[in-house]
Amino acid sequence: MLGSRVLSSVRQGLSRGLSRNVRGQTSGEGRKVDIAGIYPPVTTPFTATAEVDYGKLEENLRKLGTFPFRGFVVQGSNGEFPFLSSSERLEVVSCVRQAMPKDKLLLAGSGCESTQATVEMTVSMAQVGADAAMVVTPCYYRGRMNSAALIHHYTKVADLSPIPVVLYTVPANTGLDLPVDTVVTLSQHPNIIGIKDSGGDVTRIGLMIHKTRKQDFQVLAGSAGFLLASYAMGGVGGICALANVLGAQVCQLERLCLTGQWEDAQELQHRLLEPNTAVTRRFGIPGLKKTMDWFGYYGGPCRAPLQELSPDEEEVLRKDFTNNGWL
């Protein structure tokens, strides 16, 4: 079975990886990766009995692979990673690696609450094929997650990771943001290559870009709702939930920004605002999965305790897409 094969490989790789790091070969093993571009944060399909549906995952990837994405983000917030076991998280990443086009990058969410668990998961993600690790802020004890704690956490993970690390801040889910000065300090680490910022504060994004401009550090917008603004500030791409259903349009917005066609980019950005808000802040993953069903992908159910949309919510969601000409 895929699961046993993956776990066996992970155990062997984890042992090798940690032994290498103990000998002091730490961040030097990482490699610089250019992460500029658009990524859909891939959802995790479930069966009616709440098991991961790997067949549907592969079908979705085949369809998403036809768009000019830079790569895929797996086991981010849209992948419902808090609801998956450690073995499931690794199996999903392994499945995606095998199914996705070889020229695409795979960014795998490896964040856990403890530093030790995050290190182990990051090494494991590298063993199953991740090109870079996306590490969300630990947040359960958020009252003690000051700059010193966060710098220590990310530095230790980056020191011991065999692949580059991308910081991930998503305050809507964690109630915690990475302070700009903390990001600036971490940007100096040779194995920390960028950040996905999902907060939507354009001033903050601009400050991070401005203060890290002397480092080899890249900033990705965490949502399609402020993608144009992020590009205007000097951002290099986006990890956008909306790209799971409007992949061509999000990539088109990227092209318009990169070629300086700002009026056309503004018009397209405006048409994406309501649909994007609907599948992120308003209805979240249940809304995204319902929209995927409408657009020919497999969305399917979420894992409990997330519930499907009510009929009234579904009608509002549909209007957000039809009113902007997408359905």
Image: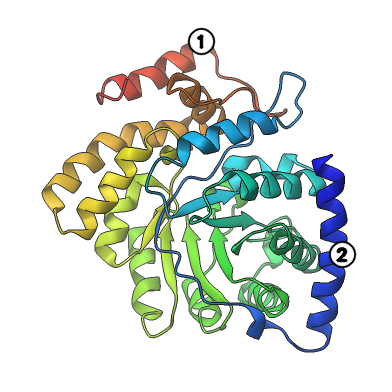
Residue 162 occupies quadrant: bottom right
Residue at 77% across, 89% down = 24
**In this rendering, would 226 be left or right of 97?**
left
The answer to whether residue 111 is above or below residue 48 is below
**In this rendering, would 4 be left or right of 283?**
right
Residue at 66% across, 30% down = 55
Q: Nearer the viewer, mark 2 or mark 1?
A: 2
Identify residue for label 1. Answer: 311
The answer to whether residue 165 is above or below residue 21 is above
Q: What percent of the width, then of the height, locates residue 222? A: 45, 52
Q: Residues within 10 Å of mark 1 (few under 14, many from 20)?
A: few
Q: Residues within 10 Å of mark 2 (few under 14, many from 20)?
A: few
Look at the image and tell me whether residue 75 can be seen: no
Identify residue for label 2. Answer: 12
Q: Nearest the camera: 124 or 76?
A: 124
Amino acid type, mark 2:
Gln
Q: Mark 2–mark 1 contact, CB under 8 Å?
A: no
Quarter in which the N terminus is drawn: top right
Residue at 80% across, 81% down = 20
Disc 2 from disc 1: Cα separation: 48 Å
**In this rendering, would 171 be left or right of 266?**
right
Q: What percent of the width, then of the height, locates residue 234? A: 30, 67
Look at the image and tell me whether residue 58 can be seen: yes
Look at the numbered disc 2 and give the secondary structure of its residue: helix
Look at the numbered disc 1 and give the secondary structure of its residue: helix
Q: What percent of the width, then of the height, locates residue 169? A: 54, 59
